[in-house]
Image (cartoon, coloured by chain):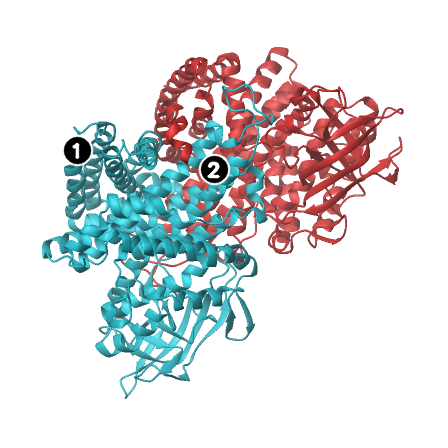
Chain colours: A cyan, B red
Amino acid sequence: MTTYQSPLRDFQFVLHELLQTSSTMQACGQPEFDEATIDQVLAAAGRFASEVIAPLNASGDEQGCRMPAPGVVQTPQGFKQAYDEFSRNGWHGLACSPEFGGQGFPAVVDTAVAEMLAGANMAWHAYPGMSHATYVNVAANGSAEQKALYLPKIASGAWAGTMCLTEPHAGTDLGLLRTRAAPQADGTYRITGTKIFISGGEQDLTENVMHLVLARMPDSPQGVKGISLFIVPKFIPDAGGAIGARNAVSCSSIERKLGIHGNSTCTMNFDGATGWLLGEADRGLAGMFVQMNYMRVLVGVIATGVMEAAYQKARAYARERLQGRVAGTRSSVQGADPIAGHADVRRMLLTQKTHIEGARALALWASQLGDLQRLHPDAERRTEAAELLGLLTPVVKAMASDLGVESTLLAIQVFGGHGYIRENGVEQHLRDVRIVGLYEGTNGVQAMDLLGRKVLGDQGRRMNAFLDLAAAFANQCSHRRGMAEFTRPLQQLLAQVREVTAELVGASANDPHASGAAAVPYLRLVGHLALAWIWARMAEVAIDRSDSADPIYASKIATARFYFQRMLPQTAALRAEIRAGSVTLMRPALDLL
Amino acid sequence: MTTYQSPLRDFQFVLHELLQTSSTMQACGQPEFDEATIDQVLAAAGRFASEVIAPLNASGDEQGCRMPAPGVVQTPQGFKQAYDEFSRNGWHGLACSPEFGGQGFPAVVDTAVAEMLAGANMAWHAYPGMSHATYVNVAANGSAEQKALYLPKIASGAWAGTMCLTEPHAGTDLGLLRTRAAPQADGTYRITGTKIFISGGEQDLTENVMHLVLARMPDSPQGVKGISLFIVPKFIPDAGGAIGARNAVSCSSIERKLGIHGNSTCTMNFDGATGWLLGEADRGLAGMFVQMNYMRVLVGVIATGVMEAAYQKARAYARERLQGRVAGTRSSVQGADPIAGHADVRRMLLTQKTHIEGARALALWASQLGDLQRLHPDAERRTEAAELLGLLTPVVKAMASDLGVESTLLAIQVFGGHGYIRENGVEQHLRDVRIVGLYEGTNGVQAMDLLGRKVLGDQGRRMNAFLDLAAAFANQCSHRRGMAEFTRPLQQLLAQVREVTAELVGASANDPHASGAAAVPYLRLVGHLALAWIWARMAEVAIDRSDSADPIYASKIATARFYFQRMLPQTAALRAEIRAGSVTLMRPALDLL
């Protein structure tokens, strides 16, 4: 079976040539992240991914997590050793602040590393991935004491973190949650309730776990405005970080799932567990959203990694598998040609390549917006980056996860019947990646977030700012050699999205179902706009270097053409679906459905 | 968990009202198949599906098939008892000739029954489903003695049948196959070789198995023109059907797969096994294609059944699950409404409903073409039906299997995170249905069959005949009340398909990759044409009865609108993809892919 190899050259293309990470970081006052330093990290992470965790991917899927005793979760063989090696090499702290023992690398580099890890072993990566998301949360919402106590432990990997949101009857609608937090005389809270679907809720990798738990105080308002956020450690630490008594939180069961078998998905019981308020009372959902938004971009990155892994298997198979004669050829030594020569197999491989490279560039760009939002000296640039990132976070999440499913389905298809067989390893990627459209807010929730909150919420102001940005790029380089084939359809799409957006602003004023009926195709339309924009930008970079001997540039231009000619036309269907309006969905005759 | 229920009313709509099965059968000289008789069969089959095999679906998936001893395959618990009950009740022979102990029902009824069985338990249904396909093969290609010996055994279910085509190095490209058939003095052949992916190759359901095996005789030409078809029984029967000595054919291993765990997928070793030539020497592939074409329509039906099962679960969940307030409503008793009221959830449910009802009507119509081809007194009508069926068989297979994947993905999505959990049962349907795009010729092969062989093979003659048929319908009823919204887009699509087809006939004359590059989107375009046509026909039937109190008619009209307004626009993207041509795929710069 093909082992995952990090697509290093493509990461370099995006980070160095497209996003110019080093000079961006220089402008942010961090000149130490030059290309050589970034390349060292990428290369080392790629080796860890290929050599340490990729070999545990199929076996981890096979073994899954187990509960050898009540409350005890055993991760698959080798996961703990790999985790320890990851910790020893300081990877947990890559993007953590030096103040807490981290290395302070830009998020965009951390994102590239995350893609490699998730591509090599999605289930394994979910442990450190989720932990880092809790780091982001506590760094944003924690008190000085909380940060000093918890963040070095997360940054070193000694402790892990989880997010505890979902309850059996409260998933998308967190306003329904019932977990209670009773204030105690000592300023702590007694947390009581049941949380489900807690990734890494219990495991055998770390000495302690910091659960971040949404719960409701006794006098809090109903609904989402009465939810607070708490830190509930598995073992209660002293101020110096030495762990003490076991807290009253335990894992009662783990889920059997379609995929990511190696990552524990736990039902967690909080039986009067001691918790500490994180951030302000009743503002827990907003606090959690810092982490959630981080996770949503990460989810796009994870999907990209899994697509890449599946694509590598499909490409290798297509180069080796001999079936049929390539059209237009008459002879071949073996009586059959590698299927990678057949036009339809190339279509399937190129669709995957295009999905991957587009999603990768988009997710890395979104991560760079995070760096700019955090670090840029110019407040206006920070605000601009924050608004763009907020707008596009649901797009990155949902678009990449949809592409992830399509892409892994195609990877299986390249294998024919052999793709259905477990030992060939490609079907696992579909099972794994299927979760990404469901967790961290379903893709339907992402679409409502984009259209309802981000677009209609300000009458299209932020969306128009993105459209203006893309239009400025298109106008500026439309007359450059070779660019018209990309900028012209981009300009056309920009006008169409502007028009559709204005229509939706109008329609939603009178029809309560207008945005719900349009949300998913609208997100996908905006996703194509973002992809078209990033592909045009990549084409520009590649055309500039097209007399280089490095074959990546010609390949990038040809792939951009593939995107524009074979993928972008899907926007016509999406616009029609949006314009069909809510009446197609809400007719009473359909209540029989 | 929701148990599968046969969608009886929709089967009645399609069989009685759309396809007018009884009067069609009367025209074919078989007046005994009146509506009441057909309804009895549908109701009884629905009960068997819901009560006997649906309860074995999840447990069969869980247990899978096992090999307790070399060469021995154990099917999941309960499969054998259900099989025996199926046999006792005469279901195997439903569409078999009375001459061989069958009941001679029209194929269109058998197809409806197959959809129910596959929906209730796809893995279980694959045993009798494959057996019946071998019945079709032997009935078409067998000698009088072979028919007399084998067909009653298959029709009673006492024996099963398999098709043995694939070898490790020969899947799509059967010309590469190496299994040898050495003629013996007594007129039999010694069969030697290894076959893989043999569905039901070994099981514990029947006393004997009739393997239909493709193999090559010593002096046969290379490639597909040197392949013959053989009957290789597991136990060698005497002329009276009493089983005798064990033949030298055995199962060496079974595959572990993404889905259909309850159906054994076997590697079969033929070690000088005794075989009998079925049909003419060196014409085995043509002989096998009788069965393959039967299977391809059946595959579309299977996909439809699985979609239906997943949809029933999603619909039940959406009616029960309370999350969020439906837009435009202010109050509800529980503080949250059933998610079936949210526009985006309705979009997901209606997409499934539309996929299912469209695919069902198309597959049943294709089955009726099989009846007409076989039974109609008018030779011209027989030829017309045969040509249409040949043209549309790959469309039914590939379109329904693609829709099957989309539809089961959506069913999971309706469940949110709960869809990812095995015990909720919906993820199994995705795993099961994923095989249908891969087996019986991958969907890429179907697309090449449609475009390469069926359309370009006669310069579009047969395709134009189908377009003419659909155009005649559209023209004839475009002025009827309420029909313009369906016939106008249908007419537009007909013109577009005619144009694209002519373009492809032209392009393929000069470009060897033109058809390979266009095949898959072309099949999907023709699939939409077929769906649009069948939806317009269904709308016509429903409009005629729209003052009936039966709510199916209003629902059918509203669903037809959903199809035309929200699904049909995908054809714009498909036409653009077709027109992008082969250059987008064959650029040398893409060889790095």
Q: Residue at x 54, y 36 (%)?
A: A320
How far across and how far down the image is residue B355, in percent?
46, 37
Location of residue A180 with respect to A424 vertically, above or below: below
How far across and how far down the image is residue A518, in percent?
29, 42
For badge 1, the amino acid type reads Cys
How far across and how far down the image is residue A290, in percent?
26, 62
What residue is pinned by disc 1?
A477
Question: What is the secondary structure assignment of the residue under circle 2?
Answer: helix
For badge 2, the amino acid type reads Leu
How far across and how far down the image is residue A465, in percent?
15, 45
Would residue A545 be visible to someone looking at this image? yes
The C terminus of chain A: image quadrant? top left
Q: Residue at x 20, y 50 (%)?
A: A388
The reply to whether callout 1 and callout 2 are in contact (CB within 8 Å) is no
What residue is pinned by disc 2?
B403
Mark 1, other Cα within 10 Å: few <14 / some 14–19 / many ≥20 = some
Question: What is the secondary structure assignment of the residue under circle 1?
Answer: helix
Q: Quadrant of residue A45?
A: bottom left
